């Protein structure tokens, strides 16, 4: 009986280890989220629209913005920098008009950008203050 239990535990551990090893290779979800600036164009970009969704959490806060019939995924700074800029839960809601400044994806068929500044509800939130000076 101990041998069977030992083999069962070994198989379970082996499957767990395989999932851990292969998991990061599977695209999708947050594993495929944009990080860094390499995926963005160098040109300044401004987007105005209506907030559809707000997420403040790891790996970084995001806004989903409807503009000209398209849904844009807008990455903000890491949670600490975003909340230190004052962009916290409650300052904006779905349905609010918003303008974001930053850099769009190099792939122009992708509706995605990284924001350095968010303007909503009479407030301006420089989530990347050192980069926002250019706007």
Image: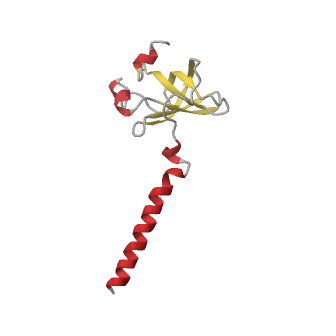
Q: Is residue 13 above or below residue 8?
A: above
Q: Position of residue 7 (x, y in %)?
A: 39, 78
Look at the image and tell me in which quarter the N terminus lies.
Answer: bottom left
Side of 107 relative to 127 (left or right): right
Side of 35 relative to 105 (left or right): left
Q: Position of residue 36 (x, y in %)?
A: 49, 31
Check the image and name the residue furthest to the top: 134
Q: Nearer the viewer, residue 70 or 133?
A: 133
Q: Position of residue 133 (x, y in %)?
A: 45, 12
Residue at image x 43%, y 21%? 121
Residue at image x 51%, y 47%? 29
Residue at image x 45%, y 18%? 131
> Number of marks in the image?
0
Q: Nearer the viewer, residue 134 or 68?
A: 134
Image quarter for residue 79? top left
Q: Is residue 28 above or below residue 77?
A: below
Residue at image x 32%, y 84%? 2
Q: Position of residue 80 (x, y in %)?
A: 34, 31
Check the image and name the residue furthest to the right: 109
Chosen colour scheme? secondary structure
């Amino acid at each position: 009986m101990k041998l069977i239990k030992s083999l069962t535990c070994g198989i379970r551990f082996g499957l767990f280890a395989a999932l851990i090893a292969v998991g990061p290779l599977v695209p999708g979800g947050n594993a495929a989220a944009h990080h860094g600036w390499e995926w963005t164009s160098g040109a300044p970009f401004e987007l105005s629209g209506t907030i559809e969704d707000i997420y403040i959490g790891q790996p970084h806060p995001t806004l989903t913005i409807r503009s000209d019939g398209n849904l844009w995924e807008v990455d903000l700074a890491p949670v600490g920098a975003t909340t230190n800029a004052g962009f916290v839960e409650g300052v904006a809601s779905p349905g609010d008009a918003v303008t974001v400044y930053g850099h769009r994806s190099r792939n122009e068929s992708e509706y995605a950008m990284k924001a350095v500044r968010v303007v909503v509800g009479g407030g301006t939130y420089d989530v990347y203050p050192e980069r926002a000076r250019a706007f």
